[in-house]
Image (cartoon, rainbow, N blue to C red):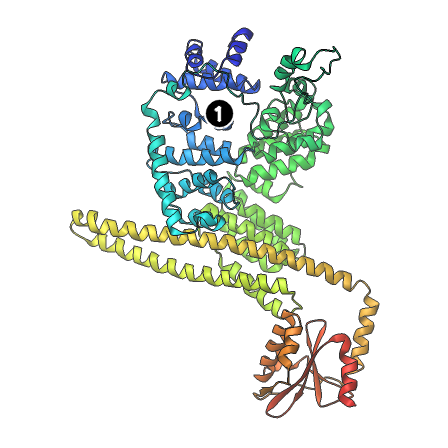
Amino acid sequence: MLTPEQQQEIDDAPLGRQLLERVQSLLPADDAEFDRWLDDALRRQAYNEYVSAFAAAISIGRRVDPHHLVKGGMIFAGYGILPEIVMRMPEGEVPESLIQSAETNIPRRHQALMVATLAVWCKLYRASVFPPKLIELVRAIARHRAEDSSIMSWYGAVAVLTKDAGLATILRRANPALASDAEWTKLSLSVTGFEKMLSAIPQRSILDAFGNSDKPQARLLAQGTTMRRAVARVGRNEPCPCGSGKKYKKCCFEKDQERLRHSTSIEGVTAEELDAAPDAHLNAETFAKLPWQHLDRIDPTKLPQSLVEPYFNRLMEMNTIDRLVDDFEKVGYLEPLHAAWRTAAISTAARQRPDLVERLVTLRRNAGFTDDDLDDIIRFSLLEENPADWLAFLEQRMDEAICYDDDPNELLHLAQATAYSSYPAIGIFVCRSIMPLLEPKQAAEVRDHLLKARDRRGDLPEDPMIDVLDKLLARQSEESDQSEAEHETLMALEAKRREARELKERIERVQHDLKRAEEQIAQNASKSVAETGDDEELRRIRRKLEGLKGELREVHNERNVYRRKYEEEQEHVLELSKQRHSAPEDSNAQDDAEADLLLPPDTSGIQPVRLIDFPRNFDQRLHEAPRQVARGTMTVLGRLASGDAAAFSGAVRLKAAPTVTRVRIGIDWRLLFRLLPDRIEVVDLIPRQDLERRIKSLTS
């Protein structure tokens, strides 16, 4: 380890060739000691020291453990040297470490550079075998448009290098500048140049990347957060705030510049002050914004109890579940922390980490609690290594769900537990059986669990049960008083459902072609022939298949957006309906008043097919009514004209005008018509409150 004097020397030196050559002579021979040095430099936020030690080791051909990239990746991106470091690390879990770094709270530009760099790395060192999580991560972040064109170019590099058609579609839809084929081709050509540039990096010395300049360089204060000044802003020629009477530049300026280098996300507080007394500067709100470099330095055993839960919540937001479990073991299980403990246990179980779940549950057992009241997902995780016990517990929970199927929470917990288990196929069937029993909002939650299970199996995102539910939703909406916004969203959802069905049919045809081509090659006696033209045909079919699957995944994501939008609109309409009917006595009085205007219902027999006669200007009446009312009116008239017996069940004749029949259109509108032997003569479409007045006009 370095002496304080050596640390200060490195910290004060400009980051360049001379510094790297100086640090080369300080590198310890022992790898474990070198790892400790890097970890300590990060803990102290000595970024100059961290970068120079890392680069110095690479410059002499020394292997550096890729796990240092998890926290170091954002620092190298901040210095603008990430590709120079990463492309010189030809082995190990480099992409996996960079993905973990990209998932933390860092600037989007750095995140984009990381994923583009690791895509080139995989092509160069892993023969284009990419981590499964890469596409999932980049698709999620690429849906949000970025003003910086270089960010979208780096995401585009990932799409081109991985040949993922779904990601390319997302990028082109989210960014109009990339929508045209010409612009996308231009991007693809630039990716070739980017790839060549990064591939050439290992051929030159890393010292050349740092240059020979001895001029002071801008220092990296922190990454992934908004920094707040540890010193108030004062003009250089203003009187010094210390009260000495001198100008600020001739008094405390240099001292304050040093203090500024240790700024944190909390105004007026340095990193050292935060470390020394976190409870004096932190609260639940500041914890929610605390970056990893400060969070990493906190000892939870020294926090007041009121801050322990916000600390654990922040660790969960940062996806650092290993650190989360380590720190829970330091603090122990406490009753006031049960909510945080439960969230942590569910999160680790959903990530298929039964080892961490076991450690968390052991803490709770040691505190004197049993497992009987644990969530299903936690209990299923504990039984992962014993399939017989796991299935026995599944049988028990399904038996209870059958007996108590009126409790939606029991069903929701069972769906979640099985979907995130080691048996996702079972989870899919459990979710399918539960979804029709729930309200739309709860069914949507189970649908998300089902789709996660399909993703883990590598299945296409579209599930047959989702189509069934969408059709039921459309049928229910036709019979309800639907808002215009709901109608438009539902129509968009239906269009996406049809598009998904067409894509699935095309995929099935291409899969059939692929199978037939493979069978032909297997029957081909000449191996050389099979490896030339036939092999190229197979690659073409497989590329086409992957492209269609990418399109289907994108359509699936768009369907989910429309579903959530529709669910939100339904909740809004339901709330308005509750407010409108908050006085049930008034509603009942209106129903009674309307009933007084009607004759008893007639017995509905077999009805003939009739033509429809519309009154003059009825199209204008439809135009004035809400769209869903107009649509419902035409639907009802079509059913009446076709002789649909069910359509006549709500048709009742008027007392004052027995030749006129009334039928409800939703809650607030009424359709009046005359039922003739061969025709339906439409009289009017009116709001409910105008019914009595309209009857008077018919009888006058």
Compared to residue 98, the image places residue 177 above or below, namely below
- Disc 1 crowd, CA 10 A, few/some/many (<14, 14-19, 20+): some
Q: Position of residue 317 (x, y in %)?
A: 60, 35
Q: Residue furthest front?
A: 237
Quarter where residue 576 is shown: bottom right
Out of 85 and 413, give the one closest to the viewer: 85
**Quadrant housing residue 22:** top left
Q: Residue at x 73, y 27 (%)?
A: 305
Which residue bears the numbered disc 1? Answer: 79
Residue 393 appears in view: no
Residue closer to the observer: 22 or 360: 22
- For image coordinates 81% across by 81% down, the residue present is 596
| The C terminus, quarter of image | bottom right
- x, y percent for residue 598: 76, 83
Specify whether 160 is left or right of 313.
left
Left or right side of 191 for 468: right
Front-lying residue, 224 or 257: 257
Please, what secondary structure does the residue beneath circle 1 have? Answer: helix
The kind of residue on which mark 1 rests is: Tyr
Is the residue 180 above or below the residue 386 in the image?
below
- Residue at 62% x, 16% y is 257
- For the image, the number of numbered tags is 1
Instruction: Identify whether 650 is placed above or below 403.
Output: below
Residue 326 makes an appearance in the image: yes
Spot occupied by residue 555 in the image (x, y as percentages of width and height): 48, 55
Q: Pinpoint residue 390: horizontal percent, then vertical percent.
A: 54, 44
The answer to which quarter of the image holds residue 629 is bottom right
